[in-house]
Amino acid sequence: MTNPNSPSGNSTTLPSDATSPSILALRHTQTYTGPKLDKLKSNYNIWLKSTDLFLTLAGCIGYAKAIIPPPGPTEPRALANWYANDALTAALIASTIEVSEWEFIDRDLGASSCWNSLKTRHQSEGPIRQVQLLQEALTTKCSKDTPLPTTAEAICKAIDRAYEMGEITQDLLKCIALLSSLSDFPHLRSMITRDLSIATKSNPFTSAQLRAYLDGEQTLMNSDSKNIPDPLILAAQTKSPIVVCSNCKRNGHVVTYCISSGGGMEGKTIEE
């Protein structure tokens, strides 16, 4: 982060700043050994705990969480140390994430910016990813082609990852079960998945909202069924019209071929 408070020649420097600055430069030599943050692994919660501990032990957590404010221009040495510490914290945060995540942080904006950007990016995927993981776990089947312990491990890992992403409530399980039942309604699944993806802890997508979608869909289906004509009525409507003679009022011929009095073939027989 660029130092916007570089002291000018007119600033009055605190005497203590030269020998005992209020902020000391941090020295860190340990390497992060915890799980690296990766969107594809959905490991945000375990990463957050590991990285919080790592930065705390390094004395940097206050910079990541913006708890330590920079000193004023009257403490140039302390201010320089603050910016060095903030840059160190940003670099340490970058070392705890996969390279694929680097594009989502900007170390030049400081440690707290990096920290908050990662939290915002990964906290937003919670509910929908939990649903996907639990559905994956519940639909995975053991087979003779794959070792049973391997399949069991995959199922357990999917459940572990889902729980690591946050609390799994009774209502979320209802959503999962209802969503799984809609395999024949892809448009509904798409709408529900969309709403789950934008849900947050403070504004969750509930099973009541999901059921409201189902109520609306059923209303549309009922309405459509009323507009479908009865097969017998439709068959009757498509039959050829009955021909009635205007002369003798009998069915099956017109006046031109009528053999009755007044008809076009008056006096003749049917054979003629």
Image: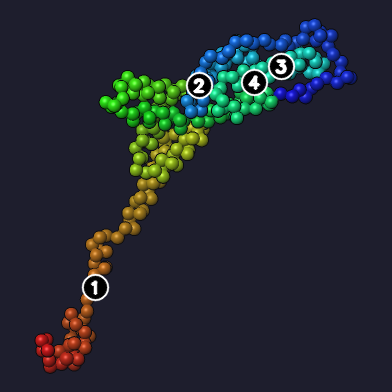
What is the C-alpha distance between the residues marked 3 and 2?
28 Å
Disc 2 on helix, strand or loop?
helix
Query: What's under tag 1, amino acid-wise?
Result: Ser
For disc 3, the marked residue is 84
Query: What's under tag 4, amino acid-wise?
Result: Ala
For disc 2, the marked residue is 45
Label annotation for residue 115:
none
Residue 25: which quarter of the image? top right
Comes first in the chain, label 3 or label 2 = 2
Disc 1 on helix, strand or loop?
loop
Foreground: disc 3 or disc 2: 3
Residues marked 2 and 1 touching at CB (< 8 Å): no
Disc 4 on helix, strand or loop?
helix
Query: What's under tag 2, amino acid-wise?
Result: Asn
> What residue sits 71% from the left and 16% below the top?
84
Label 4 neighbour load within 10 Å: few <14, some 14-19, many 20+: many
Comes first in the chain, label 4 or label 2 = 2
Residue 176 location (% of width, % of height): 39, 32
Residue 18 location (% of width, % of height): 81, 9
Comes first in the chain, label 4 or label 3 = 3
For disc 1, the marked residue is 240
Q: Is residue 150 above or below residue 127?
A: above
Label annotation for residue 90:
4
User: With 111 as the anchor, is 180 left or right in this view?
Assistant: left
Foreground: disc 1 or disc 3: 3
Query: What's under tag 3, amino acid-wise?
Result: Ala
What is the C-alpha distance between the residues marked 2 and 1?
73 Å
Residues marked 4 and 1 touching at CB (< 8 Å): no
| Residue 215 visible in the shown view | no
Disc 3 on helix, strand or loop?
helix
> What residue sits 27% from the left and 64% below the top?
234
